[in-house]
Image (cartoon, rainbow, N blue to C red):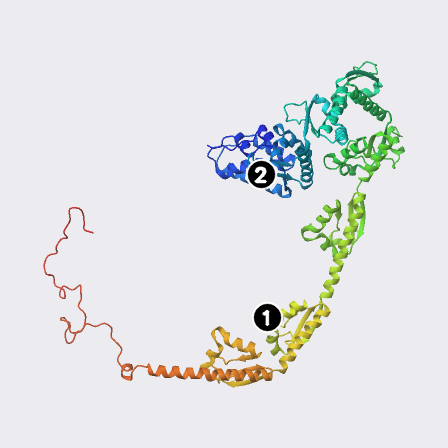
Amino acid sequence: MSSVAVLTQESFAEHRSGLTQQQVKGEETQLGSCDVQARFLAVSQARMAFAIPRLVACQTLAFHQQEHIGGAAQCSARRRQALDLHRALANITEVEVSIPSKLHNSLIGAKGRFIRSIMEECGGVHIHFPTEGSGSDTVTIRGPAQDVEKAKKQLLHLAEEKQTKSYTVDLRAKPEYHKFLIGKGGGNIRKVRDNTGARIIFPTSEDKDQELITIMGTEEAVKEAQKELEALIKNLDNVVEDSMVVDPKHHRHFVIRRGQVLREIADEYGGVMVSFPRSGTQSDKVTLKGAKDCVEAAKKRIQEIIEDLEAQVTIECTIPQKFHRSIMGPKGSRIQQITRDYGVQIKFPDREENPAPVAEAVVQENGEEGGEGKDVKDADPSSPKKCDIIIISGRREKCEAAKEALQALVPVTIEVEVPFDLHRYIIGQKGSGIRKMMDEFEVNIQVPAPELQSDIITITGLAANLDRAKAGLMERVKELQAEQEDRALRSFKLTVTVDPKYHPKIIGRKGAVITQIRTEHEVNIQFPDKDDESQAQDQITITGYEKNAEAARDAIMKIVGELEQMVSEDVTLDHRVHARIIGARGKAIRKIMDEFKVDIRFPQSGAPDPNCVTVTGLPENVEEAIDHILNLEEEYLADVVDNEAMQVYMKPSSHEESKAPSKGFVVRDAPWATVNNEKAPDMSSSEDFPSFGAQVAPKTLPWGPKR
């Protein structure tokens, strides 16, 4: 059984702190005899996880905290996971920064505190320092491009400070003060940094010492920042107790949901303790205990909440129930966003499963209309239904803004007129075209059924998206109409009358000539079918743009004109030299035809005149070609005559030709042969091969048969 390395929380923290490869290697779990590739991928996967977004890194860490034992199946799984991480890293950039190696330890800090603060501040980028003692100055930063650039600037600035004049001071403050010192959105600490130019590093949740705050920079900047922070910490240490008056009707807002509002105030304002009187008492006194500045800030925040509660109003927003699900969005995301943006509370009505009919039969009792019947009769049909009313609570101006935001989420339907013959092109293959538009513009597009043959397409969606969707649809219609017009222009047909005897020349060898005309003029050229007697055999059809079709026609007529000027002459060539003139696979004759621009036809086997060769082309070319092949004939005939003379010389004599055919292998004058019998002896016959004694047994050897 073999094991794979386990990545623990400790090794995670040490890797993030910039430890060298040797140190990391020393902390890894001892590996067994698992496949080398699996071990490498397991460790590589753990290291690469730090360079991808925090969510993936956390998931990878949780996965690796379990020990996996097994063979090839587990190793294969590790390999697949490593490859998935490689794909996730496709959008990660990597830059190298040159920093003197003597500064590396000071930049990393004790247990990697300094370098970890830069990585956390810059979106969790990975900063890798070279192995200690290697002498390399190259520091690698890997992560998203924007975060990498930010980390590079901070690292170079910190290195410059270290190189010029570095000064470090440690402060201690209670962990509950840290959030107040940092401020909302880092406003307080950013102000101190801007004023002094020093770098202030707070401990992370992984640090053992949660009270340690480190200040880095020049001595002057560090001392100034230290002074400001010590003043803030001193004020926070000065615990005071104060009280304020809060109307009892507002107490419930602060203590409901297990005191969530009070917990948020304590977290934001340095752990200040806020005590409300017990329920049932009519006291309006609220006690606050904590640092003086925190208490004052908490009192101010509570007063703001009370003002919001006192100014709170409730308004109704009427939206048909059928749109409520669309307004809420996936898992209520749209409503949650509106409540956060406008600081209001929104309550939707209960869903009405079986809506009552608009008009009910009036129930009569004792000849009179019942009470319920009167209510139905007197009810205003235009009044909104209870299931359509959404309640919004908060400040009036915020409620009105939230109401407008809700109404903007109500889907609206518009109609767009699109020619029916374009609908199938808008839908696209298997609906791909219309799905793409709906995803792009976040709307629903409804195309009428083909049997209706309607030109109206409906678009449903948010009002803000409808204009874009309509514009996109009309743009697509313009493209399709332009394509239709283009197809109509490309459908222009032209017919050319050409004698069928010229068709092979126009087509060319393996269609080379006609293919060139089609490609050059971007047209389609159709020749008549020889087997179809209903077609005119002298008609060639050209299809394409009118201008291109006319140009192709001119090209064809030019070839026809040249063919009409050509002449054909017969020349007598001794059939014994035809094979030499044609050459292997017609190579020699093709070379002659290309050189003199003529066509040369040799007679078929069984022709009346086997010596007649036809040469076709322009008159001057034909004459030159005939002279050339006649010269070849004269040259080749001399060779033919010489060969024939040699064959006559090598022919056997006449008496050898008249000799009787051989009877095969015959043994003559053998002892057994007689005058009348030349038959070979029969080996199986005892008469022809008599026995000369008993058969002798084979001699055996003491160590087995002789080989």
State left or right for residue 227 relative to residue 678.
Answer: right
* Image location of residue 83, percent across then percent down: 57, 41
User: In the figure, 700 relative to 508: above or below?
Assistant: above
Q: Secondary structure at mark 1?
A: helix
Image coords of residue 362 (percent x, y): 86, 33
Q: Residue at x 75, y 62 (%)?
A: 485
Q: Residue extending furthest front?
A: 164
Q: Which mark is residue 136?
A: 2
Which one is nearer the viewer's eye here, 572 or 229? 229
Note whether residue 383 is visible.
yes
Q: Is residue 665 left or right of residue 201?
A: left
**Residue named by callout 1:** 511
Residue 27, x across and y down, in percent: 54, 29
Q: Nearer the viewer, residue 669 or 43?
A: 43
Disc number placed over residue 443 in the picture, else none: none
Cα–Cα gap, marks 2 and 1? 67 Å
Which badge, 2 or 1, is on the more N-terminal residue? Answer: 2
In this view, 158 is above or below 600: above
Residue 353 visible in the displayed image: no
| Tag 1: amino acid | Gly
Residue density around tag 2, few if under 14, some if 14–19, many if 20 or more, within 10 Å:
some
Picture residue at 16% right of the left edge, 76% below the top:
676
The amino acid sitting under disc 2 is Ser
Looking at the image, is 635 positioned above or below residue 309?
below
The secondary structure type at the circle numbered 2 is: loop
Residue 102 x %, y %: 60, 34
- Residue at the outermost left position: 693
Q: Nearer the viewer, mark 2 or mark 1?
A: 2
Asked if residue 491 is positioned above or below residue 452 in the image, the reply reads below
40 left or right of 675 in image: right
> Do the residues bearing badges 2 and 1 touch, measured as CB atoms within 8 Å?
no
User: Could you classify mark 1 by the number of other residues whose Cα lies within 10 Å: few (under 14), some (14-19), or many (20 or more)?
Assistant: few
